[in-house]
Amino acid sequence: MLKLSEAASLALHTMVLLAGFPDKQVSAREIASELDVSEAHLAKVLQRLARHGLLDSARGPKGGFSLARSYSNISLLDIYESVEGPMADERCFRTIRACNGKRCIFGGLLVDVKKQVRDYLAETRLPDLAGILRSGNGSQKKDN
């Protein structure tokens, strides 16, 4: 029921990965290799993150991407919304309502789940997750 776009997933995983190296430039190729994703698709996501002020980029052989500001100030919601836009306040699973809206067959489930997800994303900061995607840090590498 909870669906996360590939771009949003890449953005979140990339930022968590970079939080493990807060003072280092990491190339798009290194990030793509670490996350086992297409470098071309990742490049588009990196551009969005840079455009929203979450990443700095440097060109050249020693270039790459790094966090643009203190990672303690970056929430998962900041990252998600930089790629997807503001999280919508959905109250129905359907695009066009099938019922009259007086009472949903799912009760308040969608509203409750959406609130839980939004709260988690807003409250979770990069330092909470920094380092969990490093190669040598167990089996969590490449989990989506």
Image (tube, rainbow, N blue to C red):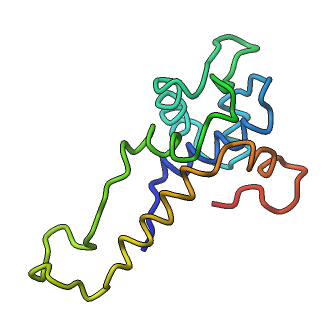
Which of 43/1 is in front?
Answer: 1
- Where residue 113 sits in the image (x, y, percent)? 44, 71
Asked if 50 appears above or below 45 in the picture, the reply is: above
- Where residue 109 sits in the image (x, y, percent)? 38, 79
In the image, taking residue 104 as reference, residue 38 lies left or right, namely: right
Asked if 80 appears above or below 30 in the picture, the reply is: below
In the picture as drawn, the residue positioned furthest to the top comes out as 60
Q: Quadrant of residue 83?
A: top left
In the image, taking residue 3 as reference, residue 98 lies left or right, namely: left
Which of 42/66 is in front?
Answer: 66
Asked if 140 appears above or below 135 in the picture, the reply is: below
Q: What residue is rendered at 82% in x and 46% in y?
A: 134
Q: What residue is rendered at 74% in x and 49% in y?
A: 128
In the picture as drawn, the residue positioned furthest to the bottom comes out as 105
In the image, taking residue 30 as reference, residue 98 lies left or right, namely: left
Asked if 95 appears above or below 119 in the picture, the reply is: below
Q: Quadrant of residue 43?
A: top right
- Where residue 116 sits in the image (x, y, percent)? 50, 66
In the picture as drawn, the residue positioned furthest to the left comes out as 100
Q: What residue is rendered at 36% in x and 45% in y?
A: 86
Q: What residue is rendered at 49% in x and 46% in y?
A: 80
- Where residue 133 sits in the image (x, y, percent)? 77, 50
- The quadrant the N terminus occupies is bottom left
- The quadrant the C terminus occupies is bottom right
